[in-house]
Image: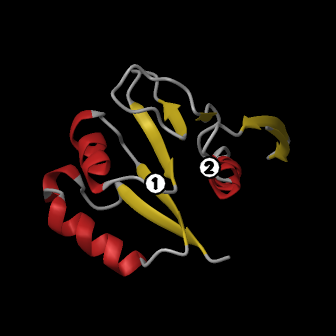
Amino acid sequence: MVYNFELANKHVRLWQCSGESYEHILMKALGFAMFVGEFPNLEIESRVGLRYKPDLVARSQDETFSFWGECGMNSLRKTAWLLKHAKVERLTLFKIGHDIAQLAEQLRYEIDPRYRPHGKVSILTLSI
């Protein structure tokens, strides 16, 4: 199914893949609307040549990732891998109805501090 959105004065078309929830589509749309002003080259679900494909991504001039957004379910293993190997300047995790304190504690416990300096990782949650 295809969804059309008007986000930050841009027409955005999102395809819902088999098994993908509508909430996941909405999180990608919301993430795009929230961050496209700060990252004008923000893209949704673009292949980047790595092990993982981001839900949202913006690249710097030097082809590093100035922004990487993950919406919904993603493992701590994936988050750690992105912080350690993907040269991500800023990683944002978008969650619906998630216990932020518990997730933050897990990230602090599982991921070495050198890979998550202050301001590099943020968690945004929605309550529905």
Q: Is there CB contact under 8 Å for labels 2 and 1?
A: yes
Callout 1 amino acid: Thr
Give 68 or 77, whichever is nearer the viewer: 77
The image quarter containing residue 100 is: bottom left
Q: Is residue 54 above or below residue 70?
A: above
Horizontal relation, residue 87 to residue 96: left or right:
left
What is the crowding at mark 1: few (fewer than 14 residues within 10 Å), some, or many (at least 20)? some
Residue 15: x percent and y percent? 72, 35
Residue 30: x percent and y percent? 69, 55
Element under label 1? strand
Q: Is residue 107 above or below residue 102?
A: above
What is the crowding at mark 2: few (fewer than 14 residues within 10 Å), some, or many (at least 20)? some
Element under label 2? helix
Residue at 36%, 57% in the rendered image: 121
Q: Is residue 68 above or below residue 45?
A: below
Residue at 25%, 69% in the rendered image: 106
Q: On residue 35, which mark appears? A: 2
- The residue that label 1 is drawn on is 92
Give 46 or 118, whichever is nearer the viewer: 46
Q: Report the mark closest to the observer, 2 or 1.
A: 1
Residue 3: x percent and y percent? 82, 41
Residue at 59%, 40% in the rendered image: 39
Horizontal relation, residue 95 to residue 51: left or right:
right
The image quarter containing residue 56 is: top right
Residue at 66%, 46% in the rendered image: 32
